[in-house]
Image (tube, rainbow, N blue to C red):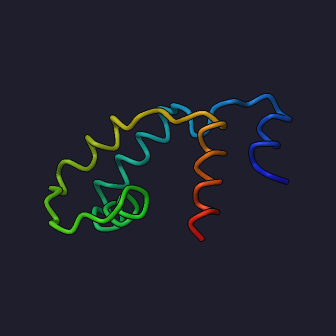
Amino acid sequence: MRIDKLYDAVGMHEYAGYNAESQEFSAEGCTRYPGACLAVIGSLCGRNPRGNIAHGVLPAMMRHLPAGTSVHNMKHWGQSQQLVR
């Protein structure tokens, strides 16, 4: 089953919505494991070839991430990824 159909079936319309606990967990994880945090950010947002993100800034960045996006947007993103392959 496609994830957008599943979300529609249960009445959810937001993907990765705001969650204070997960943001705090991410911030704590970036404090303890900055290298792993940078790897995750790089895989989601693109590599940082200059390496100019200070490790001390990572927890603050993770506490201020945007909340999420709509399931509709994720569906379009998924379609674009299929076209690339």
Picture quadrant of residue 31: bottom left
* Residue 42 in the image: above or below residue 78: below
Please tell me which residue is depicted at 35% across the width and 49% down the height of the picture: 28
> Could you say which is closer to the camera, residue 81 or residue 62?
81
> Could you say which is closer to the camera, residue 25 or residue 82?
82
Q: Is residue 19 left or right of residue 10?
A: left
List x then y, in percent, for residue 1.
85, 54
* Image quarter in which the C terminus is found: bottom right
List x then y, in percent, for residue 69.
54, 35
Label tally: 0
Q: Is residue 26 left or right of residue 54?
A: right
List x then y, in percent, for residue 16.
57, 39
List x then y, in percent, for residue 5.
82, 42
> Could you say which is closer to the camera, residue 31 or residue 38?
38
Please tell me which residue is depicted at 75% across the width and 48% down the height of the picture: 3
Q: Is residue 31 left or right of residue 85?
A: left
Q: Is residue 16 left or right of residue 38?
A: right
Please tell me which residue is depicted at 34% across the width and 37% down the height of the picture: 63
* Residue 30 in the image: above or below residue 24: below
Please tell me which residue is depicted at 40% across the width and 40% down the height of the picture: 24
